[in-house]
Every structure is written in C-alpha cells, then in structure tokens.
Image (tube, rainbow, N blue to C red):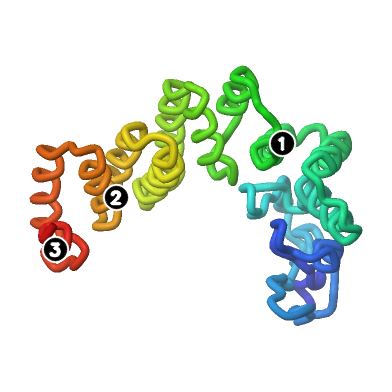
Amino acid sequence: MSDLIKGYKWFCALDEETCLECLLKDGKFVKENTPPFHDRCRCVVVPVLKTFKKLGFKINEFSGEMRASAIGRVPENGGLYKHYLIERAKTKKSGNVSDIKLIEILEDAFKKYPNEIETYRKLKNTLLLASNTELDRGTIVEMIKSVTWPSPELEELMFRAYDIGCENEVKTKLQEIEIFIKRISPTYADRHISQIYSSIAKMIKKKSLSGSLFYYKRAFELNGTAGNGLNLLRIYKKLKMNSEYIKFLDLLIRLFPENNMIKKEKGT
C-alpha cells in the first residue's frame, strides 16, 4: 500500500458544530487512524494516493475537486466557508458572536476568496435572515434571485418574502428549484421538494391559515404521505372548507385505511 499512498489526510465536517481544533486540522496530513479527536468527533482520515505521474501513468491529474458541507458543495480545501468557520469558532471562544461580528468575518473572508461569490451570497443571506435586521423588499427580491438548493436559509427566505407580499416571486423561485432538484436528484426529488413546501407552509400557517393552503397542497401532491395528508386535512377543517374536508378525508381513508390518526379524524 505504501507504493500507492502518499499519506493520510484529516477531514472534518464543515458546519457550525465543528470545533476550532478539528477545523484547524482539516486538510493536513496526519498519522493513520488518528480520529476521533474528542467525544462526538465527526472527523475522518482519508488515504491520499500518489499522483499519476509518480505512479508511472501518463494520465491527467484530477483538479477542481469538491466536497460536501452544510451549505452545499465547496472546494476540497474548504475555501471561503472553512475560513469563515475557523474565524467564527475563534470569535465564539472569545464570547463575541454577534450578528454584526459574523457579517464582518464573512466580509473579510470574501476578500481572501473573491471568486466564491455563490458561497458568499449563501452565507450572507443566512446571516441577514438570522439577524433582527429589517430587510426591504428590494433586498429580499435580490436574495430570492440568488438563493439555490440546498441552502440553509431557503425556507426562511421564502417565508420572509411571502410575509412582505412577494408571493409571486416565491412561487416562481420554487418552480425553478423544483426543476433543478428533479434534474440532479430524480429518484428523491419529490420527497425533497415536498419537504421544502411543507416547511414553508408551517411558517406561513402562523401568520395565515389560508396562505398556507397552497403550500400544504403542493407538499401532498409531491409526496402523498399520511402526514402530509393530515396537515392539509386539518387546514381544510380550520378554514371550515367543509366540502373539501369531507372529500379529502374520504380520499385519505381509502389511501391509508389503517392509519389511526385518520380514523380519529373520521370519528370527529
């Protein structure tokens, strides 16, 4: 194996739960089987092959490798996102993790990685939505245009946009996302998309029952589970849409005859 392997490289999970010590080790060569570094450590050590040239093959080397992270695919070295996470973890240790400070950290990281505009936008949107900053319609619309899937801020952004009267923009963006997900993940697309609609519906329901109806309907259309069906059924009931309630309850009873929650609805 030593003839093939250059060494062993440490990789950590790239998200906000990863500790500073593990983030600082990320991408470095270490001894074999080093992790776990601490309790609940999610790091791994991966064998790194020697270059094709050193192995005697006249083959082009791999370039532009990517890896998974909490905000989607990022460069293998972690790029802007890892830099942001490291500086965020350092700041957290000092006890000064305000929304303004995190945005400052992100802006500094972007100066070092100006080509990673998509990652920058994702993080900026997330931080703005998490803060108490009042966002005007123009800012929200621009954020909708740039948001992609998967993005941690997607559902929250769609809700905030709905809340200020941008429902047409929300529905248009969700249609784009549906097309995108069906192209890259056809097997599980309907399940993923249904979860997005369901999450948005739950947020909107707190403000408007009638406003949430469209999103609950779409969630059930995409993934007709008993859970999605019950969510929609209860909205019909609360809105006193008696005809729709009776018809839909009859459908759920035929689809899920053994479901106790649906039987209970029938009893009421």
Near mark 1 (Cα within 10 A), the count class, few <14, some 14-19 or many ≥20, is some
The Cα–Cα distance between marks 1 and 2, rounded to whole angstroms, is 33 Å
Alpha-carbon distance for marks 2 and 3?
14 Å
Which quadrant of the figure has residue 68? Answer: bottom right
- The one of 196 and 68 positioned closer to us in this rendering: 196
Q: Indicate which disc residue 109 carries.
A: none
Residue 77 place in picture, x, y as percent: 78, 53
Q: Residue furthest top?
A: 138
Q: Nearer the viewer, mark 1 or mark 2?
A: 2
Q: Which residue is mark 2?
A: 231
Please give left or right for residue 107 compared with residue 185 in the image.
right
Is disc 2 surrounded by few (<14), some (14 to 19) or many (20+) residues within 10 Å?
some
Amino acid under label 1? Lys
Q: Are marks 2 and 3 in contact (CB under 8 Å)?
A: no
Of labels 1 and 2, earlier in sequence is 1
Q: Give the left or right position of residue 143, taking residue 56 as reference.
A: left
In the rendering, which numbered label is found on residue 263? 3
Name the residue: 85% across, 43% down: 101
Can you identify the residue that label 1 sits on? 124
Query: Please, what is the three-letter code of the amino acid marked with disc 3?
Result: Lys
- Residue at (81% x, 70% y) in the render: 6
Q: Report, in whole angstroms, how far the alpha carbon at label 3 lies from the one at label 1.
A: 46 Å
The local secondary structure at tag 2 comes to helix
User: How far across and how far down the image is residue 113, in percent?
Assistant: 83, 38
* Left or right: 237, with 148 as reference point: left
Above or below 88: residue 115: above
- Going 11% across and 64% down the picture, which residue do you hit? 257
Q: Amino acid at mark 2?
A: Asn
Query: Going from the N terminus, do you reach mark 3 or mark 1 first?
Result: 1
Determine whether the residue tagged by mark 1 lies in a helix, strand or loop: helix
